[in-house]
Amino acid sequence: MLTYPYQERKLNLNPALIDEARTLAKEIVAEVKPFIISHSTVSVERAVLRLLGIDGVNSEGIPLPNLVVEHLQEEGLLAEGSARTLTRAFIHYGKSPQSLAEGIEQGTIRLTELPDFPEEVIENTARALALPAVAKIRAQRQARRAMLAQGEGIEPYLYVIVATGDIYEDVVQARAAARQGADIIAVIRSTGQSLLDYVPYGPTTEGFGGTYATQANFRIMRAALDEVGKELGRYIRLTNYASGLCMPEIAAMGALERLDVMLNDSMYGIIFRDINMQRTFVDQYFSRMINGFAGIIINTGEDNYLTTADAMEAAHTVLASNFINAEFAFLSGVPEEQQGLGHAMEINPDVPDAFLYEMAQAQLVREVFPRSPIKYMPPTKHMTGNIFRGHIQDALFNVASVLTGQSIHLLGMLTEAIHTPLIQDRALSLEAARLVFGVLRHMGEEITFKAEGRIQKRAVETLEKAVGMLRDIEKIGLFMALERGMFADISRSLEGGRGLDGVFAKGADYLNPFIRLLGAETEGREAFESSAMGGERDV
Amino acid sequence: MSEVNLKAVRPYGDTLDDGIVQLSFTLPIPFGEEAKEAAKRWALQSGFQEPNISHAQDMGEGFSFFVVYARSRVTVDFTVIEVPQLTQVRLEKRQIELRIREEVRRKLVVVGACIESDAHTVGIDAIMNMKGYNGHKGLESYHEVEAYNLGAQVSCEDLLAKAVSVSADAILISQVVTQKDIHLRNLTRMVEILELEGLRERFLLICGGPRLSYELAKELGYDAGFGTGTYAEDVAGFVLEAVLRQRI
């Protein structure tokens, strides 16, 4: 079992270079920060409304948070923040945010002719309206902590996906997976959800390549995993995806329903889903703030860079991006212990010594981020449909993972490239991983790498190239780096991609009570820490 | 070994006509001796003989998994099988570039995308992106090809509009997600839209993906389809030949 922080130093890395990389990443992120904190988006505002208690859909199936934000936009009120107008309406009408939203939908409530109130009254009221969600999220975090204390798996955590499209079928598959030894269940989303500018509502039974992320689906799966976990004496973590155009909303839903891990990358949507970069940077900031406060481990998507770029040539881009993703996480108040930075085993197995280079990369990420629950992705690009060969490739991946002390191990499936996993695919893969992890449990402690050997040289070279890349990015800025296609060989423009029309500059009197309550070093977080220590304090 | 009777072919293990197959499957019944018996009967009723349950395993939640070896007496007539397939020889990038320059005497224009719901660009990127896949450079790297990769989740309408605006020779469509046959629906939609607009004959229409084949593509109304193991050269070579053919 891994103890944190990871102590081994097998690669002879230059600590000064790692420090330089961190400093560069910090500067790169600092340059984007003024833009981030001076802007908001329609999805940030919808997340605020959800946290204020607004949920449900109208008769046409349009979510109320969307309707309210559209209404505010039409009336020119959005720049002040949805919370400000909702708070004023609350004071004026004396109705809950949910009733107000319903009234807005029915046209019985107008937000344009609200009287004004003293700033202090508005801020205090907004804060009071925000507190129930904060308290609920805090309670969920405490509940997780208590359940984890009852028992959990050991690292590398075995992470498997379910993706039937039907949440009730997912439950069957997930419960079976837990019994087969899975520690983390990820419910893959329906293909295309990342580009929806709203979150579907209610339990869903139809999806393609996955199941829609809805709050009801989160709740159904959470209850199922809690039940089977209790029986097994092992807390089963639940993963979903706070990515795409609704990042902050999904983070809010996940925090309320006690998800444990969220895919939540600062750049993935820009690169792989062609979502506008301005939109993404603002959205990731608030969504990560929520995840940070909720104690949710965020996973980053660098593992996917190598599905488009070559793993031998582009390994350093993964590391460089890991540094940047980590700094964006710090900016939102996500501590290292919740930064599940992603990387992958994707070198073409026909390359001689491919396994040595994979080991070098995995060990490199482990040593550079000794406190982070790093997430390791299995071979996918070079899986062929030959399940027998694929099972061996996955076994090699399992070996690399346990030898290099990975934290979250996304399990390879022998049927990758054929179909989303069948019940027996998962069982066979779990069995293989448990076998490998078992027989090699302490092997990592027994081996060192030859000085100046192939593994050390490869790791040192990758680190040097990553630092070089960060120096280049620092010179031109992150926006320009993305335009030049420096990540995953994909180029994106500042004004291009989806969702730019949902970005707006915050007005001078912008109000979002959750930024103070959930952000780094905030009253909400302090209150959590103090209550975690035993003293319950009312926030 | 005795001669294979191509008019009556059956699976081979280590003796001609032994008919040995390996199967693995799950039944939605609790693990136990009854489950094994059920697996055996299922195999028998499926037409297999002498089923041997070599492995049985509890999947949890009332499911049981089996690995079964059995014999089959079913035969197929190999002599009557005809599968339409691409007969072209794989050219190298250099040859393709040269032939475009000398025989087409203008650049070939290709637009590509993952259409509709599909968000998985691995396939289209392998064929189109500069770097290509497995050492085979993509169409963007071809001097004589003007390549536009529109990426993921592009609507059929947008893809067609782009093809019209750049006067494309060929439209490439990648479909990776196949759950509930979504790829067939997406691919069919593209054909329908082209036909509706009266533009089907104007473009070479080519699809690709791990579950696609030349045969299936033809059936769907495409000019060609490419499966796993396809490189940019295969696609570029096909477009080149087809464009030259159209000129005759």
Image (cartoon, coloured by chain):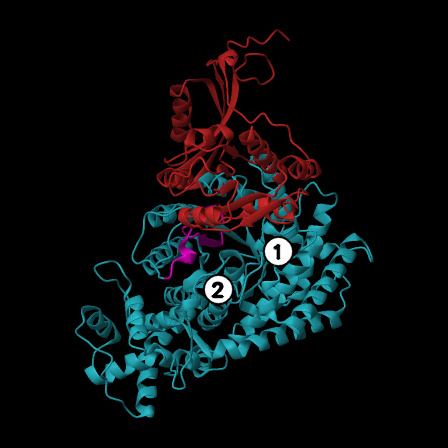
Chain colours: A cyan, B red
For label 1, the crowd category at 10 Å Cα-Cα, with few meaning under 14, some 14 to 19 and many 20 or more, is some
Name of the residue lying farthest toward the left: A108
Q: Disc 1 to disc 2, how far (Cα)? A: 17 Å
State whether discs 1 and 2 lie on one chain. Answer: yes
Closer to the camera, A266 or A410?
A: A266
Mark 1–mark 2 contact, CB under 8 Å? no
Displayed quadrant of residue B179: top left
Q: Against A527, is A318 above or below? A: above
Q: Amino acid at mark 2?
A: Asn
Q: Amino acid at mark 1?
A: Asp
Q: Position of residue A230 (x, y in %)?
A: 40, 56
Q: Kindly identify the residue that appears in the image at 53 percent across and 40 percent down.
A: B169
Whichever of callouts 1 and 2 sits on the residue coming sooner in the sequence is 2
Displayed quadrant of residue A489: bottom right
For label 2, the crowd category at 10 Å Cα-Cα, with few meaning under 14, some 14 to 19 and many 20 or more, is many
Q: Against A150, is B200 above or below? A: above
Closer to the camera, B237 or B84?
A: B237
Q: Can residue B140 be seen?
A: yes
State yes or no: residue A196 in magenta: yes
For residue A276, which numbered disc appears in the image?
2
Q: Position of residue B195 (x, y in %)?
A: 38, 37
The span picked out in magenta is: A179-197
Q: Can residue B114 be seen?
A: no
Q: Position of residue A336 (x, y in %)?
A: 57, 70
For residue B189, which numbered disc appears in the image?
none
For residue A489, which numbered disc appears in the image?
1
State yes or no: residue B202 in magenta: no
Q: Secondary structure at mark 2?
A: loop
In the picture provided, is B71 more to the left or to the right than A454? Answer: left
